[in-house]
Image (cartoon, rainbow, N blue to C red):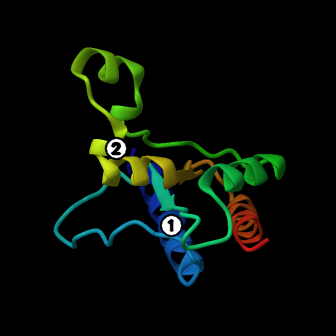
Amino acid sequence: VERYWQRRAEIWDRYMRELTGLPIGLPAPIPADERHALHLFTVQIEEGMCRQSRDDVMVAMHQKQIGTGVHYRAIPSFTAYRERFGWRTPDYPNAQRIGASTLSLPISPRLHDDDVTRVIAALRSSILR
C-alpha cells in the first residue's frame, strides 16, 4: 500500500508542477499535517477559463487513448433526487458548475513516467487547441 501511495504522490506532484499555468483549476494544496489518499487527481475545466468544455476535453483525451473520469456529477442533477426531494439544479449553481467542469486524470501507481508524459501532453493539446 505504501509503495503505491508513494507512486501516486510522485504522479500528483508532477501533475501539479507541469499543469500549473494552464487555464484550468488544480486541486487545492494538501495541508502538511494531513495525508491525502491521492486516489483522484481532478482538474476544473470551465469554458470561461479555456476554449473547451470539460466534455470536449474528455472526448479529445479519449481520442488520444487517455482514459479520464467524471468525479462527481452534482447530486441535484440526478433524477432520483429531483423526483424524490424536488431538488432543482438552478438552486445549487456552485454544485452544478463544479459537477459540469470536473475531470479526473489517471493517477494509477502502475503508470510509467512515459504514460504520465502522455497524459500531460494530451491534456495540454486538448485544452489549447
Q: Which residue is mark 2?
A: 90
Q: Residue at x 45, y 69 (%)?
A: 26
Residue 99 horizontal side relative to residue 22, left or right: left
Numbered disc total: 2
Instruction: Tell me residue 78's x, y (percent).
Output: 40, 26
55, above or below 45, in the image: above
Q: Residue at x 44, y 63 (%)?
A: 9
> At numbered mark 1, what does the secondary structure look like: helix, strand or loop?
helix
Q: Is residue 39 visible?
A: no
Instruction: Tell me residue 110's x, y (percent).
Output: 61, 48
Q: Residue at x 33, y 51 (%)?
A: 93
Q: Which mark is residue 18?
A: none
Q: Residue at x 34, y 44 (%)?
A: 90
CA gap, disc 1 and disc 2 = 39 Å
Q: Residue furthest left?
A: 33
Q: Residue furthest bottom?
A: 21
User: The C terminus is located in which quarter?
Assistant: bottom right
Kindly check if marks 1 and 2 are in contact, taking CB atoms under 8 A apart as contact.
no
Which amino acid type is marked by label 2? Answer: Pro
Toward the viewer: 66 or 24?
A: 24
